[in-house]
Image (cartoon, grey):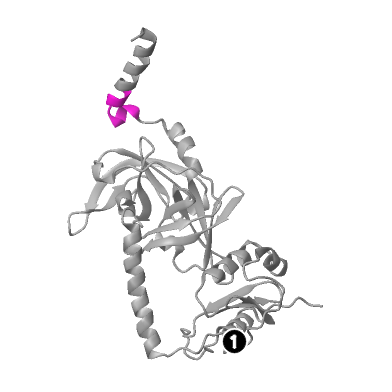
Amino acid sequence: MPLSRLLPACAGLLLAALPDAARALPADQLYARLAPSVWRVNTFDKQGKPYGQGSAVVIGRETLLTNCHVLLGSYGATVQQDNRSFGIVLQYADPDNDLCQVTAKGLDAPAVEQGDSDRLAVGSRIYALGNPRGLELTLSDGLISALRKDGKGRLAWIQISAPISPGSSGGGVFDENGRLIGISTAGYENAQNLNLARPILLAKGLAERHAAWMARADARKAAKAAASPPLPVSPAARPGLQASGYAEIDDLAKFKRVAAGAGPEAAYKRFLAAPLPRAFAISDDGQTWQTWSLAPQDQGAPREPSERAIKRCEKEYRQHCYLYAIDNTVVYRPPQ
């Protein structure tokens, strides 16, 4: 083989033989590689108002991993970097391990390389990248302080010394080569650099655990429905379900003419993903309220979602409210 070809080949073999530590990236290079793949999560309440913040890591095309507690209690969410924002939809949920996978249509960010959290060692250097207190793309470093196992001897937590704060949850914990080994999840109050991450190995089997969780939830709903028979939900049997002709149910451009802003838009997207029967109300000054189900938590509230949405909207905002949509039908009529 010519010497000009032999030298690059030998160099490649030598590099492959080096231990991971020898190939560790400088922190600035690691940050430059990973920053495009870690996004801030913004969540919204029923009215589309800001509810909370967290972080998420891109693990595939239009796919991110975060903590379920980041999304808990919210009624809509987006991922954001600088002035770019994308709505997200829950794909898989594993509340027992606090891991949720979401999709963001149109997101073109690169996926990170995933490491093997079964091969971690205490004392290894790691980096945490997230959005603590809403401060986008904050990098911190530290060590793996301990590897905590569950009662069956499986790795359940990676204890790290890298500082994290509220807003870091759902962000990435990476090894020195920039491989994702965990998801920042929790920290102890009144303790110094005593923080925990869920190992990335738990992302395997997420779809199966989601299916099991949904099956348990469906069983609970079925038991509740059996105790309270539902009202009829066919269009002919339910009140107020007459299309106005203003817009199709998923026409966001028409909706934003009525209720402008990121909050109302996120609330309406959440409404579109909600189960039937459902209703969406808007106040005179553009604030929103949505509800669904024929079994309200408040036993004194109307069972019909359209009645409940108007009543709660007017009580919350102390002004006149009107219905925009019921089920899959837009009933709003613009003023003449």
| 296 lies above or below 20 | below
Residue drawn where x is 31% and y is 67% of the image: 212
- Give how far across and how far down residue 110 sits, in percent: 48, 42
The boundaries of the magenta stretch are 15-23
Q: Is residue 300 left or right of residue 128?
A: right
Mark 1 element type: helix
Residue drawn where x is 71% and y is 78% of the image: 244
- Give how far across and how far down residue 172 sits, in percent: 40, 47
Residue drawn where x is 43% and y is 61% of the image: 91
Query: Is residue 21 a member of the stretch shown in magenta?
Result: yes
The number of discs equals: 1
Task: Between residue 23 and residue 253, name the one nearer to us.
Answer: 253
Give the dominant element type of the magenta stretch: helix, strand or loop: helix
The quadrant of the picture occupied by the C terminus is bottom right
Q: Is residue 166 left or right of residue 301?
A: left
| 237 lies above or below 19 | below
**Which residue in the protein does label 1 denote?**
307
Residue drawn where x is 21% and y is 54% of the image: 154
